[in-house]
Amino acid sequence: MRKSGILFFICLAVLVLVSLDGIGMLWDIPPGHGTKQREPVLFSIKQNGKCGFIDKRGKIIIKPQFNTAFSFSEGLATVKIGGKWGFIDKTGKIVIKPQFVEAYWFSEGLASVRIAGKYGYIDKTGKIIIEPQFAWAWSFSEGLAAVQIGEKWGFIDKTGKIIIKPQFGYAQDFSEGLAFVKIGGKYGYINKIGKMAISPQFDRAWSFSEGLALVKIGGKCGFIDRQFGKMVISPQFSVAWSFSEGLASVKIGGKYGYINKTGKMVISPQFVSAWFFSEGLAAVNPGGGTDPLNNRGYIDKTGKIVIEPQFSRNRAFSEGLAQVWKDGNMGYINQEGEHVW
């Protein structure tokens, strides 16, 4: 399952939701504005083989006790206990008992779960709202969810009604009003009534982000606009990520740099690897250095290194913290590079 949001694109657009050591990435949905009290933001950790949660200051709020844990989404987190998946609230209380073979995060009030080999959807009380009947089911986005019935993909609404009949070789979430689909070996984009908005013509396609979508033609990555599907940045990159905060990471000549929405290179290709920008910073590996195993740090939007390369793995900042690994140990840092866990 995939949640709409910032996506990891290495011409495969892989969104990593669980790390190799069983810790879910931070992905906490910001609450509403106004007078409503802001919910505490919690970050998943692993200690002595068990997963729990800390707050932004590094204080343990939910003690490590779960085999695996995803981060919170819409106030609940998916956790695994004794081989089954359930949900907890931000006090650590189990609100939906572990009972599912698979369970994914809540999105627009519903979560996809697998029961007896089929996927359906539950609400936040654990009640089955859409009976398990699908071979696969993505999370809801913009009111619709992509589901697989037999060998074909279509879209349902929150009552389970088929809105766009299964007819595609593959489909994913709606983003900015359009969803990419596969027909006859090519990718295009449909609108919410199932009408083809951008004809199938791409070897690979990804969701729209900030008005542009990453596409691949003839082994090269470029970007199209949303209004007409016009190629606004020509396919020229061997690898690219979607736009985030106005910039996109691209690979050219064996190195990664960053372009703006006109296609202008604003941070020259110089990195061995480079992720998307989040909260003003991007995780990069500049290469070289005295310790090639711990050579990942962070840059700002001018390309200046603001947190020195020192990590074996690192992730994007979210809610002020980023997950990092060094010498086999996972922790969290703030934007000053200080460890809070």
Image (cartoon, helix red, strand yellow):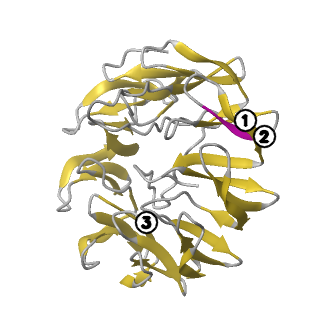
Determine the image quadrant of residue 317.
top left
Asked if residue 263 lies in the magenta stretch, the reply is: no
Q: Check disc 2: other Cα within 10 Å, few if <14, some if 14-19, many if 20+.
A: some
Q: Are marks 1 and 3 in contact (CB under 8 Å)?
A: no
SS for tag 2? strand
Rendered residue at 35%/19% (across/down): 337
- Residue wearing tag 1: 80
Mark carried by residue 174: 3
Query: How far across and down, in percent of the image, does residue 60 sit?
Result: 55, 14
Rendered residue at 55%/70% (across/down): 156
Q: Is residue 247 visible in the rendered structure shown here?
A: yes
Q: Amino acid at mark 3?
A: Phe
Q: Say which of 271 and 313 sits in front.
A: 313
Q: Check disc 3: other Cα within 10 Å, few if <14, some if 14-19, many if 20+.
A: many
Query: How far across and down, in percent of the image, does residue 70 sit?
Result: 60, 37
Asked if residue 87 lies in the magenta stretch, the reply is: yes
How far is the residue under mark 1 from the one under mark 2? 5 Å
Q: Is residue 272 left or right of residue 133?
A: left
Mark carried by residue 156: none
Relative to 184, does residue 240 appear above or below in the rendering? above
State whether the magenta stretch is mostly helix, strand or loop.
strand
Q: Earlier in the sequence, mark 1 or mark 3?
A: 1
SS for tag 1? strand
Rendered residue at 43%/40% (across/down): 29
Relative to 237, does residue 43 appear above or below in the rendering? above
Q: Say which of 206 and 250 sits in front.
A: 206
Query: How far across and down, in percent of the image, does residue 106 sit?
Result: 55, 47
The stretch in magenta equals 84-88
Mark carried by residue 84: 2
Q: Are marks 2 and 3 in contact (CB under 8 Å)?
A: no
Determine the image quadrant of residue 38.
top left
